[in-house]
């Protein structure tokens, strides 16, 4: 018999610290990696169920890659890291006193540590008509919409047989704009003659517009000159030192008053912080970015970190993938240290350089090694760019699929080019000047 008067021992499971990561981009996934061996429970939050590799979205937009080639299912992170769960949702509120976030669907979630790395969105700089009448390539959905718009314009031009010129305008001559313009030019130069015999490639214009007098502004002058020359050799029309005053549904008006009729207008100039961030009650600095200290903790609040495009450090860093990756990994390891009772360390950015591609056998690379800057262009730079971007993709399946598709696109005979396209609305012309889509 048991003694009913004996004390009962109650055993309860110890609750592990809960780390919530808002944003499944490069910074968010690297934060996960930094917490791989930590004794924590992690919830990854994102409004999308996937991570899209942004540096290659322009290839999706120009029919060089399938969207699945550059997409990683965020729930798949749990396959290699069992302390991770996923919650789809959009964060609309933050109570840093109660350590709780609120979702747009009404749900809430408590946290012990919060990491904010939601990234940025397209910046239209107040340009009249730009948001309504241009197409960005910052998300997978935008890339697909742009791809379908490009081929809709080509199909309608072929069906109408009016012989009018078709212009595609790219605004912004940073890496995204240069890569987009180069890919469009190669699509026209390599594929149009055989795929669209109704159209004269010489009457399809790719126009790159830049407010400053140079392309690839952050790069070395010699690399800028190489990129500009390579673009012109591919038939890209450069409008440097030209501002955009207004974007209309049928074209672009420049600061000079000149108007250029265009079927597609791509906006590839600058990013900004989402408006929702202003309602989170956190300190914001330059460009609305959340201010963090040298350890990447949000200034003035408890247990909140920020990384990537969303954060501004005491010594501001460029809004690029490499700083985001390094910051995310640093935060993950830092939280693991705090939980283990060890102190945080200051973040140090290691500049590994920058690169951009113009097209087949043409790219610019500036690599930082042992404190030295190594710059080169041409075929070797192009191979470096392609192999590095394939390696940076998440998942071996994506790497293999991207390698096969880019190999086919760039190294196979151009007459066998098979663009990866989606749905294109049927063109109908019912009367003079009346077109339905």
Image (cartoon, grey):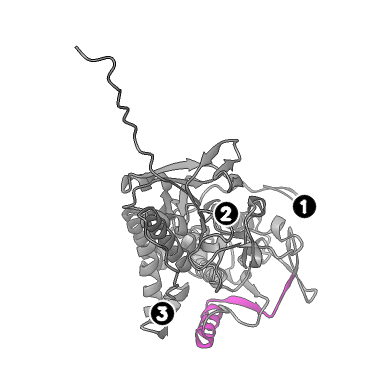
Frontmost of labels 2 and 3 is: 3
Image spot of residue 433 (x, y percent): 77, 53
| Residue 367 image label | 3
Whichever of labels 1 and 3 marks the residue nearer the N terminus, that label is 3
Badge 3 crowding class, 10 Å Cα cut-off, few under 14, some 14 to 19, many 20 or more, is: some
* Number of disc labels: 3
Q: Which residue is mark 1?
A: 432
Query: From the viewer's perspective, is the residue at label 1 or at label 3 nearer?
Result: 3
Image coordinates of residue 275 in percent, x first then y, are 66, 54
Residue 168 seen in this snapshot: no
From the image, tell me which residue sits under label 2: 142
For the question of whether residue 49 can be seen, the reply is: yes
- Residue 230, position as x, y percentages in the image: 51, 80
Asked whether the residues under the numbered discs 1 and 3 touch, taking CB atoms below 8 Å apart as contact, a structural biologist would say no
Q: CA distance from mark 1 to mark 3?
A: 56 Å
The extreme top residue here reads: 1
Question: What residue range appears in magenta?
Answer: 220-244
Q: Is residue 238 magenta?
A: yes
Distance (Cα) linking label 2 and label 3 = 30 Å
Which of the 4 image quadrants contains residue 13? top left
Q: Which sits earlier in the primary sequence, circle 2 or circle 3?
A: 2
* Relative to 33, 123 lies left or right: right
């Amino acid at each position: 018999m048991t003694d009913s008067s004996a004390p009962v021992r109650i055993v309860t499971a110890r609750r592990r610290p809960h780390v919530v990561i808002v944003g499944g981009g490069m910074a968010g996934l690297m934060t996960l990696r930094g917490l791989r061996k930590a004794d924590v429970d992690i919830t990854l939050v994102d409004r999308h169920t996937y991570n899209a590799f942004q540096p290659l979205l322009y290839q999706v937009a120009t029919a060089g890659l399938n969207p699945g080639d550059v997409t990683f299912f965020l729930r798949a992170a749990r396959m290699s890291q069992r302390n991770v769960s996923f919650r789809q949702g959009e964060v609309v509120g933050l109570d840093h006193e109660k350590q709780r976030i609120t979702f747009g669907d009404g749900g809430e979630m408590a946290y012990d540590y919060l990491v904010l790395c939601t990234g940025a969105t397209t910046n239209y700089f107040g340009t009249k008509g730009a948001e309504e009448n241009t197409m960005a390539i910052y998300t997978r959905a935008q890339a697909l919409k742009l791809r379908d718009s490009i081929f809709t314009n080509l199909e309608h031009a072929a069906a109408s047989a009016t012989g009018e010129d078709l212009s595609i305008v790219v605004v912004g001559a940073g890496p995204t704009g240069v890569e987009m313009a180069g890919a469009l030019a190669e699509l026209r130069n390599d594929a149009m003659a055989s795929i669209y015999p109704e159209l004269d490639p010489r009457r399809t214009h790719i126009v790159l517009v830049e407010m400053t007098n140079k392309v690839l502004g952050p790069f070395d002058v010699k690399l800028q000159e190489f990129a500009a020359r390579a673009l012109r050799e591919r038939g890209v029309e450069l409008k440097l030192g030209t501002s955009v005053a207004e974007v209309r549904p049928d074209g672009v008006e420049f600061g000079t008053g000149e108007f250029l009729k265009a079927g597609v207008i791509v906006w590839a100039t600058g990013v900004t912080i989402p408006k929702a961030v202003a309602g989170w009650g956190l300190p914001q600095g330059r460009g609305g970015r959340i201010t963090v200290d040298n350890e990447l903790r949000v200034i003035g609040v408890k247990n909140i970190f920020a990384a990537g495009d969303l954060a501004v450090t005491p010594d501001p860093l460029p809004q690029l993938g490499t700083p985001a990756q390094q910051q995310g990994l640093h935060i993950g390891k830092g939280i693991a240290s705090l939980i283990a009772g060890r102190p945080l360390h200051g973040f140090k950015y290691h500049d590994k350089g920058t690169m951009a591609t113009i097209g087949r056998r043409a790219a610019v690379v500036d690599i930082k090694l042992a404190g030295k800057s190594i710059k080169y262009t041409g075929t070797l730079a192009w191979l470096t760019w392609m192999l590095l971007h394939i390696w940076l993709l998440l998942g071996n399946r994506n790497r293999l699929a991207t390698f096969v598709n880019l190999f086919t696109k760039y190294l196979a005979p151009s007459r066998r080019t098979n663009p990866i396209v989606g749905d294109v609305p049927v063109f109908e012309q019912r009367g003079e000047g009346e077109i339905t889509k």
